[in-house]
Amino acid sequence: MNDLLDSLIEIIRRTSAEIPDDVQRSILAALEAEKKGSIAESAMKIIERNIALAKQKSQPICQDTGSVLFYVATPVGFDQITFEETAKQAVRKATLLGYLRQNSVNSLTGANDGTNVGPGAPSMHFHQHREPHVEVRLILKGGGCENVGAQYSLPNEKLKANRDLPGCRKVILDAVLQAQGKGCGPGILGVCIGGDRATGYELSKHQFLRLLDDHNPQPELEALEQDILQTANQLGIGPMGFGGKTTLLGVKIGAANRVPASFFVSVSYMCWAFRRQGVRLGPEAEIAEWLY
């Protein structure tokens, strides 16, 4: 398992220190769009320099390296137990090397053992696919952006939001308004329409595995994504809440079945430091291909 351990440590290092290409393109476009000499432009320039310096020095982009979320696609019969054990070992080693900050604490005592490993940490999500190889995707999600996530139950009388796509639009935009630049904007939204309270939030985070410049295969959701992105960027909240044209870098929406009694809309918020990476592993667990 040494090859797997080395591969997982490298995935963690790169995810922590390097922004994916699709996010980098979006940030550069946002910098170009902001008014020259504005506070918003200055904020985006600082973000750009932060990204370049982290990559150059191979150090974390943010002091909060966040929750460690693994999404692993495996062939039938793959040993998930050994993989999880190795992933925990990789998290410990990556923390020791400084790729991850020591920021996972015991929820009952507040104690920090310095390993980033404990109940529920790292978070492992496995699913099988009919392919011969293993794909590993990793998200590092900071606490600041996690704090401004939101979940709505429709109908919402206060927002006059009914159980339909216009109602979903109202509550998603309300989540952006409530964040007001908190969570280190400009941000990216991952949204799930439907599901229950737990699966709704889980599936909303799955949306972060998509490329920022992809297109939703469901036309009505594609239209809603573009509408919310354009509308949010006209609100004047801007980078870090300083005003400007870039409140969001992307919006990704999925839908899940629900029971008739419930209609939840779950909104996960990701900061500009969108730390997401993925690989396809080769036969010896070496990194054969980077997915982002």
Image: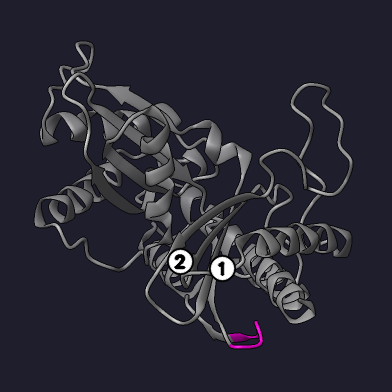
Which residue is under mark 2? 23
Is residue 247 visible in the rendered structure shown here?
A: no
Measured from the top left, where is residue 139 in percent x and y?
56, 57
Q: Residue at x 33, y 30 (%)?
A: 196
Q: What span is in magenta?
A: 283-287
Amino acid type of the residue that numbered disc 2 sits on in the rendered structure: Val
Q: Is residue 287 left or right of residue 209?
A: right
Mark 2 burial class by Cα count in 10 Å: few <14, some 14-19, many 20+: many
The answer to whether marks 2 and 1 mark residues whose Cβ atoms lie closer than 8 Å is yes
Label 2 SS: helix
Residue 205 pos. (x, y %): 43, 47
Find residue 19 and name its label: 1
Q: Where does the image place residue 199, in percent across and percent down from the top left?
A: 39, 37
For this rendering, which residue is in front, 107 or 30? 107
Q: Residue at x 70, y 64 (%)?
A: 82
Instruction: Name the residue at 31% across, 68% down.
Output: 213
Is residue 183 magenta-colored? no
- Identified at 82% across, 57% down, the residue is 92
As rendered, which of 234 and 23 lies closer to the eye?
23
Name the chief secondary structure element in magenta.
Answer: loop
